[in-house]
């Protein structure tokens, strides 16, 4: 599967075993989003993040406690803090599996001049299967490609962990951001038993 986003770039290559690159982001003019292509038949990921002038956006890993407080305040205010866990036990498409809590979660942020402006997390939900969970961009930073960039970093981590599929269960209001990096909707819109929905399943085969 091949995804290409136009624009000039610095392109490096690495195989799926390479360490996660440290992205210097900043291509938040959406017309200049970086190219990102995945060609799995040869198991090579090509990625690029544009280095724009006058920007100080950087992807950084953060702790669970940091992301938990951002999630609590902004994404899931109706949940008690202790109900917001490191992982979710949801499986892809149906059911739950408590073993998911044993996987290593990665908590991503995009930082601008020392301030966290976006967060997301990712973890394996089965062998070769990775979930993106908890995407949030602060309102004043939206519509500049930041959601897209943090999803690209999450995909990169899924690849690093040798996943063959990345999935999520986004609210429909973030569906377009997921679709913009290649995810496809793979369920009906679900209205019942969802806290801040409606939601639907999306997936991207790697
Ligand atoms: C959804 C959210 C993460 C999007 O972040 P963002 O930084 O504004 O997204 P981007 O700028 O990277 O957008 C990527 C693409 O999605 C589109 N998009 C983003 N939000 C959109 C919206 N509300 N309606 C329509 N299109 C939208 C953009 O136009 C862009 O498309 P393009 O690349 O084809 O031009 C952000 O609005 C948010 O945090 N919302 C509230 C929390 C939330 O609902 N999180 C999801 C929980 S599952």
Image (spheres, rainbow, N blue to C red):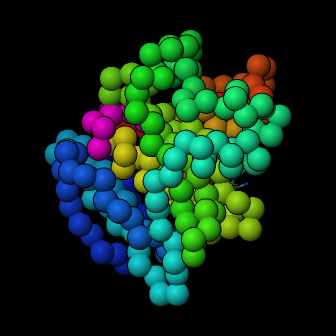
Q: Which residues are magenta?
A: 160-166
Is 106 part of what is drawn in magenta? no
Determine whether 33 is above or below 179 in the image. below
Residue 182 in view (yes/no): no
Number of numbered markers: 0
* Rendered location of residue 188, percent (x, y): 66, 25
Q: Is residue 3 left or right of residue 116?
A: left
Identify the residue at the far bottom of this view.
53
Query: Between 70 and 93, which is closer to the camera in this rendering?
Result: 70
Q: Is residue 186 left or right of residue 18?
A: right
Determine whether 13 is above or below 189 in the image. below
Q: Is residue 12 left or right of residue 89?
A: left
Query: Between 183 and 94, which is closer to the camera in this rendering?
Result: 94
Quadrant where the image shows the N terminus: top left
Please tell me which residue is depicted at 56% across the width and 21% down the height of the picture. Answer: 90
Is 163 part of what is drawn in magenta? yes
Residue 59 in view (yes/no): yes
* Rendered location of residue 16, percent (x, y): 22, 45
Q: Quarter-wise, where is residue 118 in the image?
A: bottom right
For ligand 1, which image quadrant applies?
Answer: bottom right
* Rendered location of residue 148, percent (x, y): 54, 57
Please tell me which residue is depicted at 75% across the width and 62% down the height of the picture. Answer: 139
């Amino acid at each position: 599967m091949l995804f290409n986003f136009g624009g000039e770039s610095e392109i490096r290559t690495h195989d799926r075993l390479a360490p996660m690159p440290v992205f210097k982001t900043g291509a938040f003019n959406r017309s200049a989003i970086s190219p990102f292509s995945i060609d799995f038949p040869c198991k090579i990921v090509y990625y690029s993040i544009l280095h724009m002038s006058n920007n100080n956006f950087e992807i950084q890993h953060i702790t669970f406690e940091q992301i938990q407080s951002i999630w609590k305040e902004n994404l899931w205010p109706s949940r008690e803090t202790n109900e917001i866990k490191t992982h979710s036990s949801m499986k892809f498409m149906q059911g739950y599996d408590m073993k998911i809590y044993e996987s290593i979660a990665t908590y991503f942020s995009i930082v601008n001049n020392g301030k966290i402006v976006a967060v997301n997390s990712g973890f394996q939900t089965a062998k070769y299967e990775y979930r993106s969970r908890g995407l949030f961009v602060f309102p004043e930073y939206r519509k500049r490609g930041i959601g897209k960039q943090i999803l690209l970093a999450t995909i990169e981590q899924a690849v690093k962990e040798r996943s063959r599929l990345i999935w999520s269960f986004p609210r429909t209001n973030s569906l377009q951001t997921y679709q913009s990096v290649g995810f496809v909707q793979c369920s009906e819109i679900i209205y019942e038993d969802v806290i801040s929905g409606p939601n639907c399943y999306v997936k991207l085969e790697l």
